[in-house]
Image: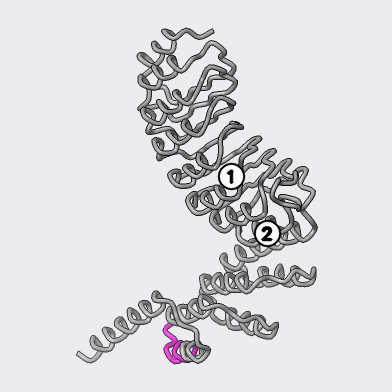
Amino acid sequence: MLEIKVLAAVGKYCTQLEDLNLWSCKGLTDTGLILLAIGCGRTLKSLGIAACVKITDASLAAVGLYRKSLEKLLVDSEFIHNKGLLSVAKGCPQLKSLRLQCRNLTDEALLAVGKFCQFLELLALYSFQNLTDKNLCVIGKGCKKLKNLTFINCDFLSDIGLDSIAVGCTELMRLEVNGCQNIGTSRLQSIVGTKGIITVGQVCRSLTDLTLKSCNGVGDLALISVGQCCSLTASECLCKKGKIPEGIYLLDQLLKEGLKPSTASYTVLIEKFCEARNVGETKAFWKYMVDRGVVLAVSAYDSMILGLSEQGNVAEEMQWLGTMLKSMLKPQKKTFERLVQFYLRLIGRVMLYLF
């Protein structure tokens, strides 16, 4: 068993300690961990606490107070409550990774995570019996940099919460949902179903790793949506690299499979064409979309106008702008700014030529 004086010595003399893992240290108490936190709080970046039965909220309060540079935290304890995690969320603004298996935590604690941990990239929640959609909505709004998300045995996770996460955390690359299939006390339906995963597929365009286990409410349409997202992402990358024929071929294959991209997806493809500085191909693809009844968004028109501006094609540029205005579409501010800059440069060249 670890004695208090041992941890106090570590805190006092190991002033460069960055990574500390405490597993099944049954003799470890709050006093020892608090002394350690005071001693090496400035350098510690990663802390793991699991199966340490005498560690309570007091230790996490010390972590929040003295370990401002903490980036990773793992806590597995049934003796940790809201107070402890609130202290960490408020006191550790650089937190990037948070893994929790604390069955006594409620909405209050995770609401604080969503509010204060804006740099969070990894969040893993295990066996949360009190997890509800309310805190997931806040996490979706506050943790915009989230890339890795895990839910295991979180009985009350629903499509509503998953929707909020997907819409807010668009940089998500990895999602695992495991064993979240129970019936909630206030719901008479499967908790995680097709709708939530469809939203993930449509919005999280950087998704590379999806794991679904024991999710009985997830149907075929969910996986079709995710597959569509992956195909469109590949097509966009090809177009951006200038491999436009390959990008169109991949899109054709997608359509042959009966997967219809959304208007937003087509708009992104237009933007990628313009980034490749191939206005001719862009016009052809525009016609390709119009022939299929696609109504393009404002950003697609903006991309086309800016692409023409880069080529100095003034007449056609104004023609597209007129078409846009006739369609009751308002160009973005950046489009007008770029047009003004272009005309100022053009006027400057004319003045130099004349004088």
Q: Magenta span has 316?
A: yes
Residue 123, position as x, y percentages in the image: 56, 41
Above or below residue 128? Residue 338 is below
Q: How many marks?
A: 2
- Name the element at disc 1: strand
16 sits left or right of 209 in the view: left
C-alpha span from label 1 to label 2: 17 Å
> Which residue carries the number 1 mark?
148
Residue drawn where x is 47% and y is 51% of the image: 142
- Relative to the observer, which residue lies in front, 171 or 27? 27
Q: Dividing the picture into quarters, in which one does residue 119 lie?
A: top left
> Which residue carries the number 2 mark?
230
- Please give the range of residues in magenta: 311-320
Residue drawn where x is 65% and y is 42% of the image: 151
Q: Magenta span has 11?
A: no
Q: Dividing the picture into quarters, in which one does residue 350 lie?
A: bottom left
Which amino acid type corresponds to the residue marked 2 in the rendered image? Answer: Cys
Residue drawn where x is 37% and y is 33% of the image: 68
Q: Dividing the picture into quarters, in which one does residue 286 lie?
A: bottom right
Which amino acid type corresponds to the residue marked 1 in the rendered image? Answer: Asn
Residue 241, position as x, y percentages in the image: 57, 65
Residue 55, position as x, y percentages in the image: 51, 20
Above or below residue 41? Residue 13 is above
